[in-house]
Amino acid sequence: PFSLRVCQEYEGDRNSEGQRHGFGKARLPNGDTYEGEYECGLRNGYGTYRFKNGALYTGNYLRNEKHGKGVFFYPDGSKYAGDWVHDQKQGYGEYLYANGDTYTGEWANNKRHGQGTYVYKDTGSKYVGCWVNGIQDGPAELIHLNHRFKGRFLSGKPLGHGKFIFDIGCEQRGEYKQPVQDKEEEEEEEEQPLPLEPIWKASEITKLTPWSPQDEELLGPRETAEAAVTEEDGGHPASTTGEGDEERGEEEVNQSQEDEETTDLGG
């Protein structure tokens, strides 16, 4: 009789029941390898798992799942170092993306979630603030080379009261407003247009003052100051908005690639 035997090699300690238990080295049927601690037949404790596609995880395991502290090196050169819970990035960690961007902060269910800092390598700008399910959302600060924006973000875009702070010693207060989209007569099943970008409406320029996004009630519109701002510089730091849009786009691409890697790679 012909029998097909799955080739799986193991060299290491076993318990009285013959299970892998203690330290061992294994080559899995798919070509992946593992070297580290076992308990009752499962990866448990510290170990290194090498994927045949070039990815590598080294860190703690709990019952065959990445759990605790660990570092994952992805095939594209990106890397995550931090906390894991049941095979998910969860807790605190740092992700170095293939394009050189970095995120350092809190994670939940494999996504940036909580407080964190995202640094854009190409421009040197960075977002410091809240994240919800991988998206910039909540009080935050977007810091550029010679100015920064403090305010709130919603679904990856600034919205509501805030202020631009310039290194020359002044600040411009105002509000990001969502423009109303004109409604036209449409045929059924016509694809809806994309939502418009929030527009910055300046209210005043002042000397530097202490303020955080929680102090929104202090930012009422002031018509006289708005007129002065409009006359002086158009009332809209266009370069800031442009940089922010480009960087948020890069960050969303990284999140998408990161999710795909997590889905494709086991261990």
Image (cartoon, rainbow, N blue to C red):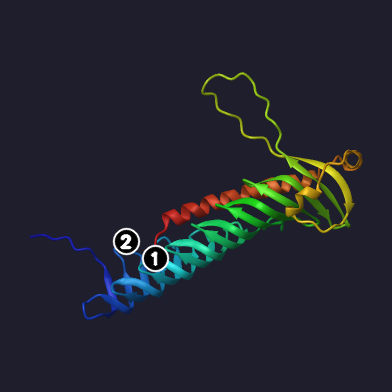
- The residue that appears at 28% across and 72% down in the rendered structure is 41
The amino acid on which the numbered mark 2 sits, given as a three-letter code, is Asn
Compared to residue 179, the image places residue 232 above or below, namely below
The amino acid on which the numbered mark 1 sits, given as a three-letter code, is Glu
Q: Nearer the viewer, residue 205 or 267?
A: 205
Q: CA distance from mark 1 to mark 2?
A: 18 Å
- The residue that appears at 82% across and 54% down in the rendered structure is 165
- The residue that appears at 57% across and 57% down in the rendered structure is 113
Compared to residue 152, the image places residue 83 above or below, namely below
- The residue that appears at 69% across and 38% down in the rendered structure is 197
Compared to residue 263, the image places residue 229 above or below, namely above
Q: Nearer the viewer, residue 101 or 171?
A: 171
Q: Where is residue 23, by image quadrant?
A: bottom left
The image position of residue 160, as x and y in percent, is 72, 44
Is the Cβ of the residue at disc 1 closer than 8 Å to that at disc 2? Answer: no
Q: Nearer the viewer, residue 18 or 225?
A: 225
What residue occupies the far left of the structure in this picture? 1
The image position of residue 14, as x and y in percent, is 26, 79
Q: Which residue is mark 1?
A: 65
**The C terminus sits in image quarter:** bottom left
The image position of residue 66, as x and y in percent, is 42, 66
Res 30 label: 2
The image position of residue 263, as x and y in percent, is 43, 54
235 with respect to 158 (left or right): right
Q: How many marks?
A: 2
Helix, strand or loop at label 1? It is strand
36 with respect to 125 (left or right): left
What residue occupies the far front of the structure in this picture? 217
**The N terminus sits in image quarter:** bottom left
